[in-house]
Amino acid sequence: MSDWETLNCHYHPDRIAIERCEVCGRPLCAYCLYYAEDGTRLCEEHAETAQQAGMAVEEPGAYAEQLIGAQVGMQRKQKV
């Protein structure tokens, strides 16, 4: 995503997306973003596929609270 583009999460339209799934391109919020062991950013569907292929996948939420705080700051900044 560019610095100027704001997208909402594919699964939570009321939340700002912080990344996209590297497989399908869906925008994802911190609560929906999975990381594969190689650092690939994935949606839930593609995280399940990666796990089935034997890859370790980090569940969302590991950094969600910090990222949500940053999103609130971004939203306030955009309204100014």
Image (cartoon, helix red, strand yellow):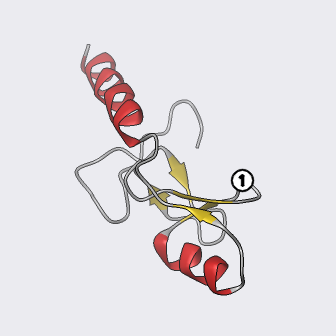
At x 26%, y 20%, the residue is 76
At x 26%, y 13%, the residue is 80
- Placement of 30 over or under 3, stated as above or below: below
Question: Which residue occupies the extreme right position in the image?
Answer: 38
At x 41%, y 34%, the residue is 67
Return the x and y of residue 19 as percentages of the image width and height: 53, 49
Which image quadrant for residue 75? top left
Label 1 sits on a secondary structure element that is: loop
| Quarter of the image that includes the N terminus | top right
Question: Which residue occupies the extreme top position in the image?
Answer: 80
Return the x and y of residue 69 as percentages of the image width and height: 32, 27
Q: Which of these two is toward me, 11 or 56?
A: 56
What count of labels does the image hold? 1
Return the x and y of residue 31 as percentages of the image width and height: 37, 53
Q: Which of these two is toward me, 36 or 23?
A: 36
- Placement of 55 over or under 9, stated as above or below: below
Which image quadrant for residue 9? bottom left
Q: Which of these two is toward me, 22 or 3?
A: 22
Tell me which amino acid carries mark 1.
Gly
Which image quadrant for residue 78? top left
Residue 31 in the figure: left or right of residue 14: right
Return the x and y of residue 54 as percentages of the image width and height: 71, 81
Residue 52 in the figure: left or right of residue 12: right
At x 48%, y 60%, the residue is 59
Question: Which residue occupies the extreme bottom position in the image?
Answer: 52
What residue is disc 1 on? 39
Q: Which of these two is toward me, 60 or 21?
A: 60
- Mark 1 closeness class: few <14, some 14–19, many ≥20 residues within 10 Å: few
- Placement of 72 over or under 49, stated as above or below: above
